[in-house]
Structures are given as C-alpha cells and as structure tokens.
Image (cartoon, rainbow, N blue to C red):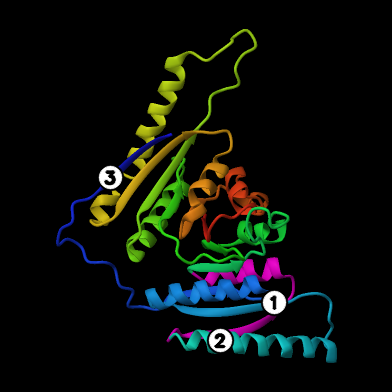
Amino acid sequence: MQEIATTAPRCAGRPRREHEMHEKVIVGVTDAAASRRAVDWAADRAAGRGDGLELLAIVGGDLGEGDVGDHAVETTQGMLDREAERVRALGVPVEARVGRGKPVERLSEASGSAVLLVIGSDYRGPGSGPAWGTHGIRIIAGAHCPVAVVPDFDLTGRSGVIVGVDGSEPSERAIAFAAAEADRLGEPLTAVSTWAPIVLPRHMRAYPEDYLRNLQQLTEEALGISVAGLSQLYSDLHVRRVVERAQRPGTVINRLAAGARLTVIGSHGRGRVARFLLGSVSEQVLVRLAATTVVVR
C-alpha cells in the first residue's frame, strides 16, 4: 500500500461555504430502526448546511381505496408527523407526506426534485447477519440524485471521509462531493485507488517486477491528477492518497472506511436498463456497509 498525504497551506483564503438558500433533501422513511438513524443523519446534516427535509413514506401493496388503505395511510402519516417533530426540534425546516405505490419507483421518482435522497440500511455490520438486499440497491440505481445510505449501527466517534477514485466521470463527481463534505465537517479526506494485474499467462511463473511497479506508479499518478485541484478550492483540507493492489476495490474501500464518518463512491449505471444496475465496486461497498455511504451518479 502506498500512502501520500498533502495539505494545502493554511491561509486567509476562501472561507468555508455557508448555504444561504434551502435545498431539499428527501428521506425515505419506514417504521424500522434503520430509518430513524437515516432521519437523524439527514437532520444533522441539514442543520449544518441550512437545508430543508422532506420525509417521505410509501405505503405499498394492493390496499385498495377502502378502510384498510385509509387506515394504513393514516397510521403512516402519524409516524411521519412524530419524526417531523423530532427534526423541527433541531431547527430544520421539514415537510412530511405519504405516498402510495411501489417504494422503489416512488422514491426514485421523488428524487428528481431533491439534491440528495437518504435511506436507511438494515445491515448492522460484520457478523450481524446477511448482507444488504437488492431492494435498497434498486432505489439507488434508479435515483436521479446522489443517495446516502445510513447503516443500522452506531457511528459516533468516527472521523474522516473516504472517496473511491477510478478516473471516471462519476468518480470525479464523487471527489467533488466528498471534498465539499470533508471541508464542511473539518475532516481529512482519504482518496483511494486500486489496481490489478492481468491474469498471469500459464507459461509464466511470475509477473515481471517492473510490470507491477509500473502499475502502482501509474495509478499513483492518475490519483494525484484526480485530486490535484482540491487545494485551490479548499485551502485547509488535508488530503491523503492511498493506492493498493486489489481484485475487489470495494473491500479496500470498506476496510479504510471502518472508522470513517462518511464514504463516497461513484456509480456507472446509465440508460433505461443500466439505471437499475450499479457498478460492481458500488455493490461491493453497499452490501457490506462500513460507514454512511453516498453514491454519486
């Protein structure tokens, strides 16, 4: 593993950005404990940025238009109203509404009017049970804005922001999001890239030493280029660069994120079919969340 740390000199340059205008963040809400953590995370972030929240719960299934359906909506609205009161206590503007239909489709549609969609994950960490399922991944893949996924375990006392970097356009957008969050929070940023050699041909016993060394060096150079402009935007931001050889980049990202406050990754899904799929690295990270993770499209 190669690590390079850079810090821009501290000076009286650009002040930290303050958001004067409310931007809307949507939180997908259910009656699960993981959902409460998602609301707490979104409310804390909104309070720091000056954003407004919309709490959105979807009543699914074929409930019809009679008493059963009306009761389900009424009960859900009551739950949302209680969550909204908790958010208002923090001084955060909040609205609460109930929708009906398929949760994946309705949340994906709603994300078109938001700057961020926040959902909870019932994954409770290593050794706690099965990985996160496809339901949440389909919401992320269909969303029209970045999606934050909050896991169902305690994240207090953590520090640092991790961002996965591979040189793609989604990766560049992930860097921009991660750097802005790290600067706002006063946290260091760790940018992570990985590389892997081709499968060793059968007639070869080992890779040429310069081949592996060159892959490491080229990846380090590409990572340096990707984060080169951050010091001009954020004069106080500490940036650490990590380059490792790995067949599964998501595993490396989650290992480094085990004590982090936030992870940010890019997703390569595109098009009418591809939008319901995520890149393999994104799925590797999401099914075994190590921290609150934002997926940027």
User: Which disc, if any, is residue 84?
Assistant: 2
Residue extent of the magenta highlight? 91-114
Quick one: label 2 or label 1, which is nearer the N terminus? 1
Q: Which residue is pictured at 44% across the width and 85% down the height?
A: 90
Residue 78 to residue 261: above or below: below
* Residue 122, percent from left and from top: 67, 64
The residue lying toward the viewer, choosing from 125 and 102, is 125
Q: Give, as a three-letter code, the residue at label 1.
A: Ile
Residue 235 placement, left or right of 205? left
Residue 108 belongs to magenta span: yes
Q: Which residue is pictured at 60% across the width and 45% down the height?
A: 279
Residue with the most extreme left position: 12
Label 1 Cα neighbours within 10 Å, binned few <14 / some 14-19 / many ≥20:
many
Can residue 66 be spotted in the picture?
Answer: no
Residue 216 placement, left or right of 141? left
Q: Quadrant of residue 79?
A: bottom right
Residue located beneath label 3 in the image: 6
Residue located beneath label 1 in the image: 58
Q: Could you give the CA–CA distance between mark 2 and mark 1, rounded to whole angstroms?
A: 16 Å
